[in-house]
Image: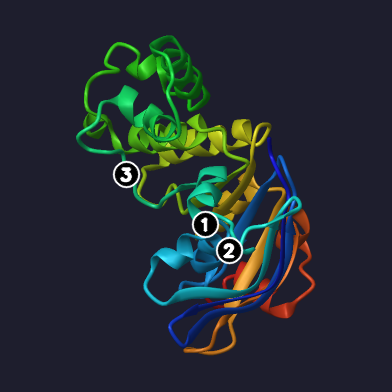
Amino acid sequence: MAKRIDVTGLTAFYGTHRAIEGISMHVQPKSVTAFIGPSGCGKSTFLRTLNRMHEVTPGGRVEGQVMLDNEDLYGPGVDPVQVRRNIGMVFQRPNPFPTMSIYDNVVAGLKLNGKFSRAELDEVVEKNLRGANLWNEVKDRLHKPGSGLSGGQQQRLCIARATAVEPDVLLMDEPCSALDPISTLAIEDLISQLKSRFTIVIVTHNMQQAARVSERTAFFNLAAVGQPGKLIEIDTTDKIFSNPSVQATEDYISGRFG
């Protein structure tokens, strides 16, 4: 079930370095929220705090609060592995498990979390490959390696793998940056379909992509090199791209910097 994210006063550290500072925002369920901004402004770091992937980096920690509906994701006793199961992630470069078949890639997360019959697994594979618009392309080679697919197909396989465990939220960190234009459009179409089932947050360097796929857009920026990234503005995508409230947002959108 898609859930709402509420972030309050979030600051993320790598050791003593503050990567982002004082970020507060709400992410609506069953919608797409895009993060834009220049390189190094903390978009991906912030995305990774939403499912505690940030902590995987040595010295990574946060101050502040991230709520998934009414659950504090950084509360005492909360299992970060369970958080990452509930909040799935698709990375910049497609990363199917290279030694696994297409079938086994899709059900990898399920097999970690319990026992399922072959019939149940078959159903999950078909449902999620159909959901990723990949079923017709791979149904006759489900037991061939996922690494044998094209880049765009591999990324859709990774999305099928992420959705198979029925997460509440799907995070996407520049999911199209390594893909050709045709594969990019296929992923964008897929994102538009998936938002009926999931809360989606996407980091993108492509402002046209943010305008095409998202309902809300957040602009991040640095005050200066070496300073922590901050959320400058978040609003409906139409407003951010047509009439932003902050001059720095308009300067970035119009290409004056970045």
Tag 3 and tag 1, C-beta contact below 8 Å: no
Lower position in the chain sequence, tag 3 or tag 1: 3
Q: Is residue 4 above or below residue 53?
A: above
Is 7 left, or right, of 98 in this rendering? right
Is 193 left, or right, of 123 in this rendering? right
Amino acid type of disc 1?
Thr
**Where does residue 18 sit, x and y in percent of width and height?**
52, 84
Q: Mark 2 — residue? A: 36
User: Which of the labelled discs sits on residue 39, or is there none?
Assistant: none
Lower position in the chain sequence, tag 1 or tag 2: 2
Lower position in the chain sequence, tag 2 or tag 3: 2
Question: How far apart, in angstroms, are the residues tagged by discs 1 and 2?
Answer: 6 Å
**Nearest to the observer: residue 70 or residue 34:** 70
Q: Residues within 10 Å of mark 1 (few under 14, many from 20)?
A: many
User: Which of the labelled discs sits on residue 95, or is there none?
Assistant: 3
- Residue for point 46% across, 72% down: 39
**Where does residue 196 sit, x and y in percent of width and height?**
68, 32
**Where does residue 98 sit, x and y in percent of width and height?**
22, 38
Q: Mark 1 — residue? A: 204
Amino acid type of disc 3?
Asn
Q: How crowded is mark 2: few (under 14 residues within 10 Å), some or many (20 or more)?
A: many
Tag 2 and tag 3, C-beta contact below 8 Å: no
| Quadrant of the rendering where the N terminus is positioned | top right
Q: Is residue 122 above or below residue 168?
A: above
Tag 1 and tag 2, C-beta contact below 8 Å: yes
Secondary structure under the numbered disc 3 in the rendered image: loop
Secondary structure under the numbered disc 1 in the rendered image: loop
**Nearest to the observer: residue 186 or residue 1:** 1
Q: Is residue 212 above or below residue 152?
A: below
- On the question of residue 254 being in view, the answer is no
Amino acid type of disc 2?
Ile
